[in-house]
Amino acid sequence: MSYQKPIPLKNHDNHPYWDAADRHELSLQKCESCGEYAHPPGPSCARCGSSELSWENLGSDIKGTVYSYIVSYRPFLPGFQDDIPQIIAIIELEKVPEVKIIGNILECKPEEVNIGMPVQMVWVDITEDRALPQWKTV
């Protein structure tokens, strides 16, 4: 069966992020002028406005903690009906705590999730050439 959910599109600003995700790695955009990380990535630094941006590869061993979350009991888009209830979380990265990444916490019951809970990034291969970063409890 083919993947039924929307597939994130690569564009000029985010393709290094998705290229890394497809290799099961995390790459973050960083401003060369002020050192601020930018996520989600964009054409310039949200802090200082510089367009001097680079990419830092953090590898595949990505840990974090639940910063905030919601539990969705209804599918807002087609394809998500089999994932209900779905835990949608903002994760604070362990190596770069100023960066927060949104994703789903997989294989976790809603009553088990809590703020501060440790999680590990995993990649779900949704097509032959696309992987989505998600989270599992540690």
Image: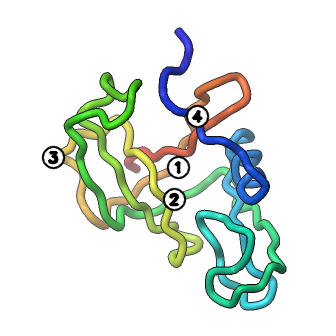
**Relative depth, front residue between 40 and 43:** 43
Q: Earlier in the sequence, mark 4 or mark 2?
A: 4
Is the C-beta separation of discs 3 and 2 under 8 Å? Answer: no
Name the spot of residue 60 as percent of width and height, x first.
66, 50
Give neighbour class at mark 3: few <14, some 14-19, many 20+ (Cα, 10 Å): few
Is the Cβ of the residue at disc 1 closer than 8 Å to that at disc 3?
no
Q: How is the image coloured?
A: rainbow
The residue beneath circle 4 is: 7
Residue depicted at x 76% and y 45%: 19
Q: Is there a contact, CB below 8 Å, between mark 3 and mark 4?
A: no
Instruction: Return the residue at label 3.
Output: 111
Task: Tell me which numbered mark, 1 or 3, is placed earlier along the sequence.
Answer: 3
Q: CA distance from mark 4 to mark 2?
A: 24 Å
In the picture shown, does residue 73 fall above or below 91? above
Q: CA distance from mark 1 to mark 3?
A: 20 Å
Give the residue number, with chain letter if any, for mark 2. Answer: 63
Q: Which residue is label 1 attached to?
A: 121
Q: Residue furthest left?
A: 111
Q: Earlier in the sequence, mark 2 or mark 1?
A: 2
Which picture quadrant has residue 24?
A: top right
- Residue 86: where, in percent of width, then height? 29, 39
Task: Report the number of numbered marks.
Answer: 4
Task: Say whether residue 80 is left or right of residue 41.
Answer: left
Q: CA distance from mark 3 to mark 2?
A: 21 Å
Name the residue at 63% across, 81% down: 46
Q: Is residue 77 left or right of residue 2?
A: left
**How many neighbours does mark 1 have within 10 angstroms: few (below 14), some (14-19), or many (20 or more)?**
many
